[in-house]
Amino acid sequence: MKQMKGLDFWVKSAVWFELIIPGYFFGKTFGTADAKYRVLDEFMYPPVFIKLCSYFRDMPSAEYYYTGRFLGVIVGAMLGVLLAMLVGVFYKWVLKDWAYAKAARIGSLAFILIALLTGFMSDFFNENIGMALRIEEKAPDEQVGRYLTQDYGGFEKGTKVTEQNAHLLEYYGTVKANNPDGARGWWIGSIIFMYTWFILYFLCAHRLFKRNKVPRKAYFKLQMVNFGALLIYLRMGFGISFEEYHFIITRAPYLFGGM
């Protein structure tokens, strides 16, 4: 069972592509982080991933924006593929009599869910938290006390920032719109969504084990590999903690004032 016998070159290649695809979708998020939200990305995701991809993304000059974006995505994708293959190493360690490609394939298929979660947190929750805290020099008069639904969230004109931070706003001008309550709602929603998705990850992994005829005695060990991967990901900085959220809220005026 250690070798995948009876398969031609293209079928074997397809197995390896199944390792690359989830890694790409996982890592590209770090390379597509726009500079205006990069400060939030360093809170939402492991800072080392964001900084590494940002280094390559900023390497070309500003006139080569898309070239830099391409480099950032490539580096992020490489990180994702390496992580997917590392999960495969531990799957192979549990399934000792399986070929590495076959064991890693199961782990990578389950890993697609984490890749989707990572991208979704950036494109939806992370962006909306930033948009809710964005400072507008002048909000439209007709939007006083209302939400700017066309701008992803809400900026309520006239919201005052805490007095201890007021002097830091002079450089940016008068604050006309800021909605910390909206940001808090998106932050709470992101936490609920994230941990609900983790549960889905374990359920889908269980179904994959059953479908691929993984020995039942290995189920628990493989799920512990999945749990360990998630725990490391969280400890590296995935998700915005309460302390980080408090830091963002109290410093939002000068973190996002230049947007």
Image: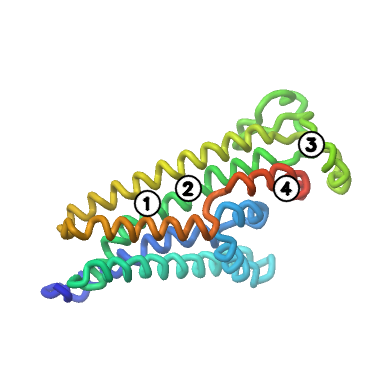
Residue hosting label 4: 256
Answer whether labels 3 and 4 touch (C-beta < 8 Å): no
User: Mark 1 — residue?
Assistant: 113
The amino acid type, in three-letter code, at marker 2 is: Phe
Quadrant housing residue 218: bottom left
Residue that lies at the very extreme toward the left in this rendered image = 6
Residue 223: image location, x then y, percent: 30, 56
User: CA–CA distance between discs 3 and 4?
Assistant: 13 Å
User: Which residue is label 3 attached to?
Assistant: 161
Residue 99 location in percent, x, y?
A: 21, 73
Q: Identify the residue under disc 2.
A: 120
Q: Where is residue 256 shown, x and y percent of the image?
A: 73, 47
- Residue at 44% from the left image edge and 59% from the top image edge: 26
Three-letter amino acid code at disc 1?
Answer: Leu
Q: Earlier in the sequence, mark 3 or mark 4?
A: 3
Q: Nearer the viewer, residue 161 or 26?
A: 161
- The numbered mark, 3 or 2, whose residue comes first in the sequence reads 2
What distance separates the C-alpha of mark 1 from that of mark 3? 38 Å
Q: Amino acid at mark 4?
A: Phe
Query: Between disc 1 and disc 3, whose residue precedes?
Result: 1
Label 4 Cα crowd, 10 Å radius (few <14 / some 14-19 / many 20+): many
Q: Position of residue 111 (x, y in %)?
A: 36, 57
Q: Residue at x 35, y 65 (%)?
A: 87
What residue appears at the point 53 percent right and 60 percent down from the top-left corner? 236
